[in-house]
């Protein structure tokens, strides 16, 4: 009876192995998110501290131009 309970109960070995697998995949996701967070933090620091990078972002994403410039938008 103990053998059956050990393997097939709610707190048995099968459930333990599933939880161990979930824990491992969660740890991998955590590391990936840490790396992504570091990259995003670095970009935020660049945007805050580099005026030329701020201008680059505004020109690229908002399509802003100086009064003497023209913007050409090419559709693919």
Image (cartoon, rainbow, N blue to C red):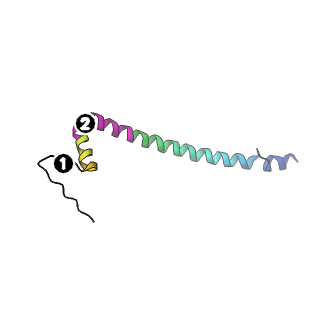
Left or right, residue 47 beside residue 7: left
- Residue lying furthest right: 1
- Tag 1 residue: 65
Secondary structure under tag 1 reads: loop
Query: Which label belongs to residue 35?
Result: none
Residue bearing the label numbered 2: 50
Number of on-image labels: 2
Q: Which residues are magenta?
A: 39-52
The reply, left or right, for residue 9 in relation to residue 49 is: right
Measured along the vertical axis of the image, is residue 71 above or below residue 34?
A: below
Name the residue nearer the viewer: 25 or 75. 75
Report crowding for label 1: few under 14, some 14 to 19, many 20 or more residues within 10 A (C-alpha): few
Q: CA distance from mark 1 to mark 2?
A: 18 Å
Percent across and percent down for residue 51 are: 23, 37
Disc 2 on helix, strand or loop? loop
Q: Is 29 displayed left or right of 6 in the figure?
A: left
Mark closest to the chain's N terminus, 1 or 2: 2
Magenta stretch encompasses residue 59: no
Residue furthest out toward the front: 67
Q: What is the quadrant of the C terminus in the image? A: bottom left
Give the x, y percent position of residue 49: 27, 33
Instruction: Give the image location of residue 59, x and y in percent.
Output: 23, 47
| Residue sitting farthest toward the left | 68
Q: Residue furthest bottom?
A: 76
Viewer-side residue, 23 vs 52: 52
Q: Residues within 10 Å of mark 2 (few under 14, many from 20)?
A: few
């Amino acid at each position: 009876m103990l053998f059956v309970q050990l393997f097939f109960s709610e707190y048995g070995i099968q459930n333990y192995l599933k939880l161990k697998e979930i824990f491992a995949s969660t740890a991998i996701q955590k590391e990936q998110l840490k790396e992504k967070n570091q990259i995003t933090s670095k970009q935020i620091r660049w945007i805050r501290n580099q005026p030329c990078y701020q201008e680059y972002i505004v020109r690229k994403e908002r399509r802003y131009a100086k009064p003497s410039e023209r913007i050409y938008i090419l559709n693919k």
